[in-house]
Amino acid sequence: MAKASAVPSWHRLAQPSSQKRARWAHGLNRTRWVSCGRVWDAVAITPLERGLDALAGLRIGPNRGCLVLVDHLRGVLYVMVPPGSGDVLVGVPGVRVLSDGNELLMPATYDDSTASADLISYPREDEPPVLVPVGRLADKLSDFTAASEGAPVS
């Protein structure tokens, strides 16, 4: 029998716990709008599972300190990349880049979350966020698109 990994996977982190859901139901968490394009750009990836697969495929561990947010209501994964680098993602299906002039709903603190703003990975205390390399992310998402287009239709 395979031993379970002590490091949580992106897919497991994206599954809200019953405790988290209870906090959401009671409205105990706070959110705020944060401007994109200053410290980071947000890459919105749909469907959510495709974005999680891309992060797993990049072999970037969830505990590394990347800034990754899930909108469970809309099924969108937001991955933060260096500001101004989103041009690399133009034309990739299911991807939208939020940069200057856009805002993203974020938890007010790393301990807060809601069903529409759930941070599943965030920087270590007193450290800036680790931003996902946009070129590698674009390549991985393009690989998934090519693979799905080449898959036989059933």
Image (spheres, rainbow, N blue to C red):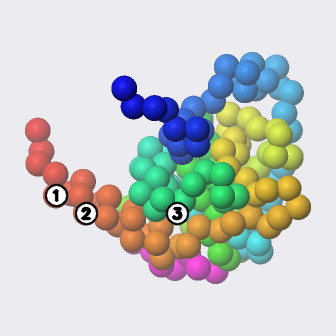
Residue at image coords 73%, 21%: 19
Q: Which residue type does callout 1 highlight?
A: Gly
Q: Where is residue 14 in the image (x, y as percent from the top left)?
A: 58, 38
Q: Where is residue 139 in the image (x, y as percent from the top left)?
A: 39, 71
Q: Residues within 10 Å of mark 2 (few under 14, many from 20)?
A: few
- Magenta highlight range: 84-91
**On the picture, is 101 further left or further right than 16?**
right
Q: How many marks?
A: 3
Q: Which residue type does callout 3 highlight?
A: Arg
**Location of mark 1 (residue):** 150
Mark carried by residue 96: 3
Whether residue 75 appears in this view of the structure is no
Measured Cα–Cα span from mark 1 to mark 2 = 6 Å
Whether residue 65 appears in this view of the structure is yes
Which quadrant: the N terminus? Answer: top left
Residue at image coords 46%, 32%: 3
Measured Cα–Cα span from mark 3 to mark 1 = 23 Å
Q: Is mark 2 on a helix, strand or loop?
A: helix
**For the residues bearing labels 1 and 2, Cβ distance under 8 angstroms:** yes
Tell which circle, 2 or 3, labels the residue nearer the N-terminal end.
3
Residue 20 among magenta residues: no
Which quadrant: the C terminus? Answer: top left
Q: How crowded is mark 3: few (under 14 residues within 10 Å), some or many (20 or more)?
A: some
Q: Quadrant of residue 141?
A: bottom left
